[in-house]
Image: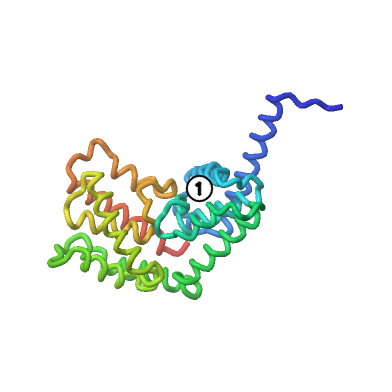
């Protein structure tokens, strides 16, 4: 009888994870070519590794189920499971009435795909249109000093930038976004109105946890840069990198 020592089993598992990671890199390259092109392989690998860890928190231990979880990450954001934009994801993942994790993984992936269809439009037309609108208006976002009620101003702005996503998320979620966004900005030392608007717009487009998004490390790097004590410089840098990211997304390969 073949006996496998504990250290050998660890080696086998490590090798299996490396192979799975390589397979997932190819998966992202095929199904999320823009993500791969913009971020590059090292960041994509980091996101996949992060996804492997998080998926196991929900008993997704087979390669199939981990693949589905990571796929949803690339659709919705790496921290979709705790993002208040997607309460249905949290409900699915916490529901223990279904004994088979594969059924749970299927439900998660199918619901995420349905959500994306509702906000993206045919052939991602609405997402592309939203980025084009953002490109057109990005200078006003950072330069205009809004008058009147802040919440009303930002809600009108978000509706104009990406109406379909605004409608799908709903007023209650957008109200929460405004409150959470202002607090998050303040936590990073950003108290200017334009700086808060910029961060809320980023959260709206990229996920409410975009400041902790491993796919977008530049956001966290800027917000937590200890050498950037002047909030004006921090906001300016965040704005410049946001425009750079947007242009990469809109540039055809």
Q: Residue 55's x, y, as percent?
A: 56, 47
* 67 lies above or below 50: below
Tell me what residue is drawn at x 63 percent, y 48 percent: 23
Total count of labels? 1
| Residue 225 shown left or right of residue 102 in the figure | left
Mark 1 = which residue? 44
Question: Which quarter of the figure has residue 166?
Answer: bottom left
Q: Residue 214's x, y, as percent?
A: 43, 46
Is any atom of residue 128 visible in this view? no
User: Which residue extends farthest bottom?
Assistant: 122
Q: Residue 99's x, y, as percent?
A: 65, 52
User: Which residue extends farthest right?
Assistant: 1
Question: Which quarter of the figure has residue 202?
Answer: bottom left
Tell me what residue is drawn at x 37 percent, y 72 percent: 167
- What element does badge 1 sit on? helix
Is any atom of residue 60 visible in this view? yes
Tell me what residue is drawn at x 48 percent, y 60 percent: 88
| Residue 197 shown left or right of residue 214 in the figure | left
Name the one closer to the observer, 11 or 252: 11
């Amino acid at each position: 009888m073949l006996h496998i020592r504990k250290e050998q089993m660890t080696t086998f598992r490590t090798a299996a994870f490396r192979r799975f990671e390589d397979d997932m890199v190819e998966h992202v390259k095929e199904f999320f070519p823009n993500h791969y092109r913009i971020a590059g392989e090292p960041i994509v690998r980091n996101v996949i590794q992060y996804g492997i860890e998080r998926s196991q928190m929900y008993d997704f231990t087979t390669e199939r189920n981990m693949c589905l979880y990571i796929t949803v990450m690339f659709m919705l954001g790496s921290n979709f499971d705790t993002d208040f934009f997607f309460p249905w994801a949290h409900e699915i993942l916490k529901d223990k009435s279904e004994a088979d994790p594969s059924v749970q993984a299927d439900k998660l992936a199918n619901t995420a795909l349905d959500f994306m269809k509702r906000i993206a439009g045919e052939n991602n037309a609405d997402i592309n249109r939203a980025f084009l609108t953002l490109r057109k208006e990005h200078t006003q976002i950072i330069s205009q000093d809004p008058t009147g009620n802040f919440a009303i101003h930002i809600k009108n702005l978000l509706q104009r930038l990406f109406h379909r996503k605004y409608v799908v998320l709903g007023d209650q979620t957008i109200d929460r976004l405004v409150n959470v966004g202002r607090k998050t900005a303040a936590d990073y030392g950003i108290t200017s109105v334009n700086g808060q608007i910029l961060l809320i717009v980023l959260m709206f487009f990229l996920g409410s946890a975009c400041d902790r998004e491993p796919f977008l490390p530049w956001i966290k790097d800027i917000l937590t840069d200890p050498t950037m004590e002047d909030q004006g410089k921090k906001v300016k840098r965040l704005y410049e990198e946001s425009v750079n990211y947007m242009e990469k997304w809109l540039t055809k390969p």
